Image (spheres, rainbow, N blue to C red):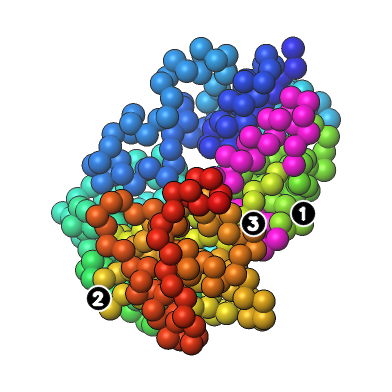
Amino acid sequence: MEHIVIIGNGIAGVTAARHIRKLSDKKITIVSAETEHFFARTALMYVYMGHMQFEHIKPYEDFFWSKNRLELVKGYVTKVDHGSKTIELAHSESMTYDKLIIATGSKPNKFGWPGQDLKGVQGLYSKQDLDNLEIHAPNKDMCKRAIIVGGGLIGIELAEMLRTRDIPVTFLVREESFWNGVLPKGESEMINEHILEHHIDLRLNTNLKEIISDEAGNAMAVVTDKGETIACNLVGLTAGVTPNIDFLKGSGLELGKGIKVNRMLETNIEDIYAIGDCAEQREAIGNRKPVEAVWYTGRMMGEAIAQTICGNPTQYNPGHWFNSAKFLDIEYQTYGWVFSERNIKPYEEHFHWRHDHEKACITISYHRDTKEFLGINTFGIRMRHEIIDRWLTEHRSVDHVMAHLKDANFDPEFYTSYEEAIVAKYNNQFNTTIGVKKKSLKRIFFNA
């Protein structure tokens, strides 16, 4: 019986295992050093915040794995030997494979800061990170202040988590405005305001220089590039993530930032594949980055590789870019491409609307010459994925999008609707007379 070994039990690896089992009777082994069972990584924050127990974020009952003949091995892989088709684990164990899928995910970036490996210095990625938070930041008495380094989605999540326990937070962000390498100016400025409103000490244009240790090897303060020393008991390193591939150096696999793969998710070595955060596309797909540390792309890669393993060669095809997140109380969605001022394309124009006093805004990207709709960011407004995806596929114009905005709105009933105000500003700015069409279920569900 062909033996499929999967290193990593995150969303990519587990999706691959589940779909291979649906399609075949192959022997499947999942190896992971992190936890016994798969859990929803994006829900770790809710465990710390008291909304859920860790058991609640495991999507499958513990008996699921044996029932579906998915063998779980808890261990840390130290070496891959493609010549003998063997992986070596810590404590001198080894395992042979016929096909190997590497899905080892990411690890927090570290940039050589003095003190970055002290106790109380951590990222927010793994179950071990959650456990360490309970040790170093269980409450405001044990943790007098936390320092978060790096402004992005993980950093804002960690800040929200700590504030639920009334722990003071200082947020060091090297940019002049929060996440302005990704968000256009108006959106980034709104998030700056929102962070400050939540009593988070936001320090823009500020870099970490050093983490100072106490006599027991715990973090006790940070020094910034402004010459300031700030006392703390926890330092969260959230300046992005990098593929977790150190154990593959010298393996013969072609490595860049991640494990180099083609659209079939094949590496340079026969019968070895890489998926999820650790995979790096040899050629970027459209405007997507070669490495995508995003939950849903890991799932899609897992589904694609399962088809290939089971005799139906399938390319990874992620479709139009989308993502969603929360900035404290503000829900964020993005579809297509809306670049920040730092990365905007020569042909790209933006229309931006923001509510006068509520934390709600929208930015629409379109082609300067053709007026083709390129993408949309929304804050505080939920959009219907299928409609936006359809508009992008059909190359609709920005005027069409403005007229049919109500079709795309996915806010619950009785929520405030902003479409009339958005289109009124658009008409005034561009001297147009577009009317907002009533929401049509026929257009939404039957593509009329």
Check the image and report above or below for 423 versus 336: below
Q: Residue at x 23, y 66 (%)?
A: 198
Estimate the spatial distance between the alpha carbons at disc 1 and disc 3, rounded to whole Å. Answer: 25 Å
Q: Which badge, 2 or 3, is on the more N-terminal residue?
A: 2
Is residue 292 covered in magenta? yes
Helix, strand or loop under label 3:
helix
- Using the image as rendered, state which of residue 401 and residue 100 is in the foreground: 401
Secondary element under disc 2, as helix, strand or loop, is loop
The part of the chain drawn in magenta is 286-315
Of pointers 1 and 3, the one earlier in the residue sequence: 1
Q: What secondary structure is marked by label 1?
A: loop
Residue 148 visible in the displayed image? no
Q: Please give the name of the residue rendered at 42% of the width and 29% of the height, measured from the top-left corner.
A: 59
User: Marks 2 and 1, Cα distance to the nearest angstrom?
Assistant: 46 Å
Kind of residue indicated by mark 3 = Thr
Above or below, 32 relative to 135: above
Pointer 1: residues within 10 angstroms few (<14), some, or many (20+)? Answer: some
Write down the quadrant of residue 361 in the picture: bottom left
**As rendered, which of 229 and 134 lies closer to the eye?**
134
- Residue picked out by circle 1: 282
Can you tell which mark lies on residue 357?
A: 2
Q: Which residue is mark 3?
A: 393
Q: Nearer the viewer, residue 205 or 292?
A: 292
Q: Are marks 2 and 3 in contact (CB under 8 Å)?
A: no
Q: Is residue 112 shown left or right of residue 63? A: right
The x and y percentages for residue 18 are 58, 25
In this rendering, the count of numbered labels is 3
Q: Is residue 426 left or right of residue 321?
A: left
